[in-house]
Every structure is written in C-alpha cells, then in structure tokens.
Amino acid sequence: MQLKRVVLKLSGEFLSHDADNISPDATLELAQIIKSARDAVPGVELACVVGAGNLWRGARNGRGMDAATADYMGMIATNMNALALQDALERVGMQTRVQSAIQMQQLAEPYIRRRAMRHLEKGRIVIFAGGTGNPFFTTDTTATLRALEIGADAVLMAKNKVDGVYDSDPRTNPTAKRFDTITHADTVARKLEVMDMTAITLCMDKKLPIVVFDMYQTGNLEKLLRGERVGTLIQS
C-alpha cells in the first residue's frame, strides 16, 4: 500500500509505561521510534492523534459525573499528552505543531484543516488534540475524522504488544487466529475490538484503510511508512 500521508493513532498508555501519569522516559522512547521511522522514510507526511487513558477515563474517573463534563475533561487531558509528545519529538529534533479542537491559544493552534495540511506539506508532524471538540466521541473517531479531512491514505492504529487483529483475545485463547487482511464489514459483523463502532463505520463508509500493528516491534512503523505489509490491514 503506497502511503503519502497517514494519521498515527496512539493510546495514552504509550506515554506512561502502564502508570496513570505521563512518563518522560516512555514519551521519549515513543518519540525516538517516530523519529527513526520518519528519518528513514522522509517523504511520508505524518499526523498523530493521542488518547488520554493514562490521565483520564470518563467511564472510570468520571463515574457519577455529567457525561458531557467527563468527556470534556478527557479532551483537556489529550492536550496534556499532545504537549508532552510535542516536547519529546522536538527534543529528538523533529518539527511539530499541536492543533487543538478546544481553543487553548497560549498552548496550541486551533484546529484549521488547511493549516494542518500546510504543516504536513512542510514536513512537520501535526498532533491533533482536544478530540473532535464535542463530547460523546472517542479519540478513535477523532483519528478517523482528521484522516478524512486531511486526505490521509490510512489510519495506523498503534498497539502495545498486539501485532494485529485476531478473531478472539490471543491473551486468553492460545488458538486465536490473526487476520492478515479483513474487511471493515467483517470487523463490524464479528464485533472485533479494533476501534469504536462510530470510527470503524465511518472508515467503512469512506473506504479508509486501517492498519493495526505492534508499535514496539522493531522497525514496524518504518516498514508501514515504506508501504510494506505489517500487522492487519482492514479495507473495503
């Protein structure tokens, strides 16, 4: 699959080493993986969307709260992670911009589609923060929406120690089958937990490919940017 522009979806746990915080060491390790891949394949334009599960989960931390308020707090947390990732990427020599769907003028640019595309064309990594700017939508949906808006060729769903999509949980089922390729429709029909249903159905409707891969397996991100087959490809 030839890639010119991609959106890399990262969970907040990549910044935390499995703790409920932001770990500078984990964030720097992530930045170095991204830099290594970009340096090896400089022609591919890269945007990132990072979740906030290391800092805030509405279902867990916001129990009893107004659901919209809990979601807004989660969107604010994605800005914290975006700034941490920006700092780490710039420490390893990458040019970045953070664009937030929630206005924070002292910290980040507002999300403006054409400006984001221009940054990408100049070789900068754009980090989309603040979710969609609306409650009740996950960062999976943010990644899909931004990918469609900027004309990305694929959404790259980074996982930690999961090398693709399986027909059941490989951690509990040793005979679980991994798919090399699968359609969006089959993913929905089988109720495979790749991303939330709003995101996967949007990808299906717009025929946007998704690649699910192990971020920490050496060279995987570089191979993907080169167009090599890694992990599981979900397509129409």
Image (spheres, grey):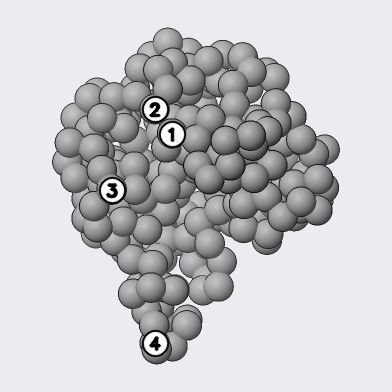
Q: Secondary structure at mark 2?
A: loop
- What amino acid does circle 4 point to? Met
Name the image quarter holding residue 72. bottom left
In-front residue for pair 65/88: 65
Q: Which residue is labeled 4 in the image?
A: 65
Tell me the number on the disc at residue 161: 1
Name the front one of labels 2 and 1: 1
Q: Secondary structure at mark 4?
A: loop
- Residue at the location (37% across, 57% down)? 52
Estimate how packed mark 4 is, as few (under 14), some (14 to 19) or many (20 or more) residues with alpha carbons within 10 Å: few
Compute the Cα span from label 1 to label 4: 33 Å
In the rendered image, the quadrant that contains the C terminus is top right
- Closer to the N terminus: mark 1 or mark 4? 4
- Residue at the location (72% across, 36% down)? 234
Q: Measured from the top left, where is residue 209 in percent x and y?
A: 70, 36
Q: Report if the CB atoms under discs 3 and 2 are less than 8 Å apart.
A: no
Q: Measured from the top left, where is residue 137 in percent x and y?
A: 56, 66
- Closer to the N terminus: mark 2 or mark 4? 4
In the rendered image, the quadrant that contains the N terminus is top right
Q: Secondary structure at mark 3?
A: loop
- Closer to the N terminus: mark 3 or mark 1? 3
- What amino acid does circle 2 point to? Tyr
- Closer to the N terminus: mark 3 or mark 2? 3
Tell me the number on the disc at residue 18: 3
Q: Is residue 48 visible?
A: no
- What amino acid does circle 1 point to? Lys
Q: Secondary structure at mark 1?
A: loop
Q: Which residue is labeled 2 in the image?
A: 216
